[in-house]
Amino acid sequence: MTSPSPAPGLRSSQNETTDLATHFPGMISPDIRTGYSGWMVDKNNLVVFASELHDQLGYDYLSSVTAVDYLPEEKMEVVYHVYKTTGGPGITFKVQVPRADEVEIPSLVQIYPGAELQEREAWDLFGIKFTDHPDLRRILMWEGFAGHPMRKDWHEAYFEEEGKPLKSRWPEGHAVMAESKNIYGDNITYPEGFNPESQTFDPEKALYDALKLYSKDDIGLGTDHIIVNMGPQHPSTHGVFRIAVMLDGEKIVNLKPVMGYLHRNHEKIGERNTFIMNMPYTDRLDYLSSMSNNFGYALAVEKLMNIKPTERAEYLRVTMAEMTRISSHLMAIGALLNDLGAYFTPMLYALEERELILDIFEAVAGSRMMCNYFRFGGVARDLPEGTFQKIKNLFFERLPRKIDEIDRFLSENEIIRSRGIGQGILTAEDAIRYSAAGPLLRASGIPYDVRRAEPYSIYDRFEFDVAVRQNGDIYDRLMVRFEEIRQSIRIVQQAIKQIPDGPVTTMKPMYQVRVPPGESYGRVEGPKGELGFYLISNGKPNPWRYHVRAPSFINLTAFGPMCVGQKVADVVAVLGSIDIVLGEVDR
Amino acid sequence: MDSNEMNTPGYEIPPEMQGQVAITSLDKIYNWGRSASVWPMMFGLACCAIEMICAAASRYDIARFGMEVMRPSPRQSDLMIISGTVTKKMIPVIVRLYNQMPEPKYVLAMGACASGGGPFKEGYNVVSGVDKFVPVDVYVPGCPPTPQALLNGLMKIQEKIRGESIKNSRWYQKGADMAEIPVPMLGPDLIDPRKITIIHNIKKA
Amino acid sequence: MNDMYGKGIIKGLGVSLKRFFETYLDDLTWLGKRYRTDEGIAHRASKNARGIFTVQYPEEKIPVPEEFRFLPFLVYDESTNDEIILRCTSCGICAKVCPPQCIWIIRSSDPATGRPIPDPAEFYIDTDICMNCGLCAEFCPFDAIKMDHDYELASFRRNVYNKGRLSKPAKYYQGIRPINAGHEDAARATKAAARMGQSE
């Protein structure tokens, strides 16, 4: 599969364009808006087109499904990005329907089961109904919430203006708490005719009904299934995440994840922010690997603006991204072992190394976790005195030795082997169908890594291997993470040797950047998987649509099927091996 | 020890009330025991939780203060460290957990999000500060506060505990138990049961 | 399993035991000067750290690097008769670039003519909204607002800081960020010299 210098944005190479148009005569048409690319498909042809794409043309990996609200043109649009697992650029196709209160589009869950959670999100936030979806319920907000928040005409309780900067802050900026401007004194609005005393709605009923759909009583004895809730406050759920399990004794019959307990309205706030203001907010998505998030966002905006960073900035970006991959994997290994029962000792060993990496982030970017280091056209500032020597010491002398020590400590331990080998298996076909990404995909045998499949930045100059294992169980996911840490150390060693001198940014620092209209999808290989940023700009200082393709969220589609048939005690270990971060799952 | 040395200065102790002196120094021992072994509840919501875990890890050891026993169960903990953004979907759970904690209980709001909504204050799913529902004792600003800042906040809680007195403590008075905070409900938007009459009046007007 | 069952566990225990011995051996070689000294703290944060890794706050504090950012503060120069001259001209760029919009500025105006003066009448920052991103300090054209290093700010109440609470002298700023302050002072001196050269 050859891919010449990767084409920017989503423009497929010339052969693909003509091939698709001849392959589907009359069904699709190219998207001709300025700055846009991809294909427009009619709603009635959508299922046929998608199944042809999947079966005949080999586009078997659905990366992202998202919705856009075009209020001025009275249209709602759903955007799909598909890729081949053999690598290369992908295809974008869109469905446009007139905007109404109830919008209906056929669901693609039968062809690409990985679309399940993403279509539920589009229903929750935009009000788009997907016919034939197996379980269309709200996912991030609770059942009974009034309205669909991401629509452009839905205003939140503290709404002041459509876009920042707000006029109330300067020059007459009287410091008024936002609560005092709301009639209820709080961040609340109620719809017309609402009577608080007649509140009888039960938000849990829909969840438990969905769980019961799959219960079968084929034993003959009069048994009953129990529903148990794990979380949201539970020492092992990696944050506020709730799992509703239906049990037959100790075996799991059905499992449904419930999320939204940390839904912080990242996308709605992103539409109100200007482009540079969004950079610190991306730090807080996957808060363990902030440099990767910054990287993805900077790539997406630079594609729109059509600028390239300087050489030194590229090397600094790669170094920081790989260091954050190591720190995130260390935390994941520590947390997985915490879940397996080794109460805190391996976590202490892993966190010690992570602290040394965070010291370097603090010296370079200013903060241990929320780095806010990347800017459009380069990075914010150069390395201070002495930091380069510290990075050299860490990567040539200390880290390789310490990773081997942790590996020796853990990988031959009998308890980890017996709890990990053969449990929580995800087969290769299932991994592709459920749109799994990152170490979850690679531990099941599919060598798909965005740094190799569609290289971005300067990754094509470095020699590194993609870590793959074949069985797809918990032990393999742990070993894949160790191997990825070693490969990251290798990349940083090469980057440090090759880094040139020079300026670190191409542009003068401007706090209001001019971004031409268009759309772009910038994706990077984050530690948890493929992290993508879908941006639509209409020339104004604020983006029109800002969507994050979160790997942890989509990896959870595979969580239910992986656990059915296992015992309850293994659910915690499987969740630890998927390695979710709630900031990303809920955004 | 001479009974004059044990007296707190400023107290006029008539001879028949010598028992009063015992209460004053009992305060010190009682508070010393409580402040040197505060058991936090393991309650990490978001990014600040990672800094809390780092504070419990080997570099900024929280065990030196006696707090390494992080209990996941609210029935066995003294201090609830609310670390991270409090969303409307999560606040009924937080209030229920706060009600389940036994007296004496303290709350530390860690980070900008728990203190006052933080950078996400304008969101439709974010509660502007957990002190709208639960009484907070110490606020630690920062986004996220470094582990050293969190340890500073914990030292302030210890200072507060040491300043309390058995004579004024609520949990030993007769019949003055803190009433349970009513759990908020999730309807078209968050409904605080303490404010139902206010909402009714506003809706009528 | 051909090997003895439990060999992996014993290997793991061996790693922990090695660390235990290293701690006490290092205590002996440092002859008691390992704790509460600056060299001891620096050693425990370097690549040679072995054995115990703890830095005992509050008696030992890890020195923060120069770029560290916590809450912002306003810089003022002191004139010859100890007057406080804030560098801020209330241009409003920091309020416009702040992502959660937590800065409120009231620009003062000349009481006689009503035209605006480059001086803030009031300057509020709500620290319960501030996300410590540093964009205000990065884009200020007058070096007037900078990020502080002080993190010991826990309090019993919520905090909206006003102009008085936020102002700190330029000497303090040079103390915490010597390299940056050096660059900025040199740049301002050359600009002032160029302006003097032009006006002559």
Image (spheres, coloured by chain):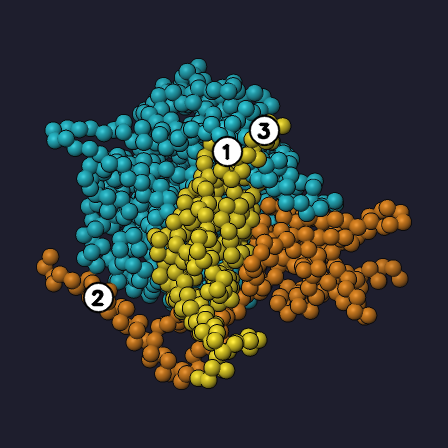
- Tell me the amino acid under the disc marked 2: Lys
- Tell me the amino acid under the disc marked 1: Asp
Residue at mark 3: B203
Which chain does tag 1 point to?
A: B
Q: Indicate which label's residue lies in the foreground, 3 or 1.
A: 3
Image quadrant holding the N terminus of chain C, namely bottom left
Q: Are marks 2 and 1 in contact (CB under 8 Å)?
A: no
Q: Are marks 2 and 3 in contact (CB under 8 Å)?
A: no
Q: Is residue A277 visible?
A: yes
Which residue is depicted at the point 24% across and 65% down?
C12
* A474 versus A252 height, above or below: below
Q: Indicate which label's residue lies in the foreground, 2 or 3.
A: 3
Which of the labelled discs sits on residue C11, or is there none? 2
* A4 versus B155 height, above or below: above
Q: Which chain is yellow?
A: B
Residue at mark 1: B189
Residue at the limit of the structure toward the left, as seen here: C2
On the same chain, marks 2 and 3? The answer is no
- Colour for chain C in the figure: orange
Which chain does tag 3 point to?
A: B
The location of residue C74, given as percent across then percent down, is 69, 59
